[in-house]
Amino acid sequence: MPEQADPMAGIPVDPAGAGPSQHTDVDRVLVDEHQLRERIAQIAARIDADYAGKDLLLVGVLKGAFVLMSDLLRALESKVPVDFMAVSSYGSATRSSGVVRILKDLDADIEDRHVLVVEDIVDSGLTLDYLLRNLRSRGPASVEVMALLSKPARHKIEVPVRYVGFEVPDLFVIGYGLDFDERYRGLPYIGTLRSELIPEH
Ligand code: PRP
């Protein structure tokens, strides 16, 4: 019997995109609003089922995850508490180094609780690797990850991500929480930045 594909693995995204964008700085839309809504609803339903009857805490990683957190939270049936961490990775604007500084720690004590870390994107995986090791040292009942996007071509380290929205190609992606130079986080879709605006071009 062939192994069933995991429905919570990322849906591969066509590099040609879902269509053109109205925004002049955006080359094309990779994941549109409808696709985002549908996928987040699917993942929320799975999270509701997986954590039924458990003491779950959602931990959003600022800043990128704040848009996703807001939509995920509202898509969940269960009334889940939320907390946030803010981290900054040392490195250039486009590449993280794996050395992570905690700018804002959790308010909550996570000992014996089930933690679901919510990230916008797993790029090299170094930020998440650090965060997971840090959170596990606090004695939680479990720690899992939901990431809206994963960029497999850039992974330097394999981190276990239980719920992945989409697998994106190695392109500079912005919108839905993701920034370039702190801008574009408010775009309601995932798009690609026009190539002439990309640093090191
Ligand atoms: C992004 C993203 C992840 C991290 C992923 O955050 O939100 O936390 O980079 O990169 P990695 O897998 O290569 O470690 P960023 O540092 O851009 O900060 P932001 O969320 O405030 O935009």
Image (tube, grey):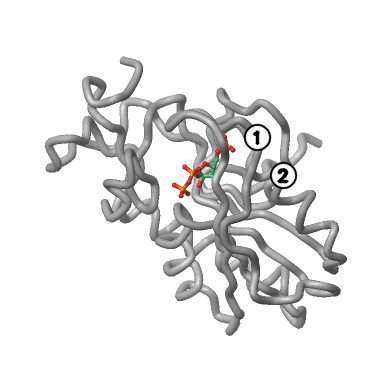
- Identified at 68% across, 71% down, the residue is 49
- Name the amino acid, label 2: Tyr
Q: Position of residue 194 (x, y in %)?
A: 23, 27
In the shown orientation, is residue 36 left or right of residue 108?
left
Q: Are marks 1 and 2 in contact (CB under 8 Å)?
A: yes
Q: Position of residue 130 (x, y in %)?
A: 72, 44
Q: Is residue 29 above or below residue 161?
A: above
Which residue in the structure is indicated by mark 1?
98
Locate residue 62 relative to residue 48 in the image: left or right: left
Q: Quadrant of the C terminus?
A: top left
Q: Is mark 2 within 8 Å of ligand 1?
A: no
- Examine the image and state in which quarter residue 195 appears: top left
Beta carbon of the mark 1 residue lies under 8 A of ligand 1: yes
Vertical placement of residue 96 versus 33, above or below: above
Pick the residue in front: 70 or 167. 70
Q: Residue at x 47, y 72 (%)?
A: 75
Q: Is residue 200 above or below residue 131?
A: above
Q: Which residue in the rendered view is the most extreme toward the top?
A: 201
- Per the model, the C-alpha gap separating discs 1 and 2 is 7 Å
Which numbered disc flags the more N-terminal residue, 1 or 2? Answer: 1
Q: Quadrant of residue 193?
A: top left
Q: Which amino acid type is marked by label 1? A: Gly
Label disc, if present, on residue 130 of the rendered structure: 2
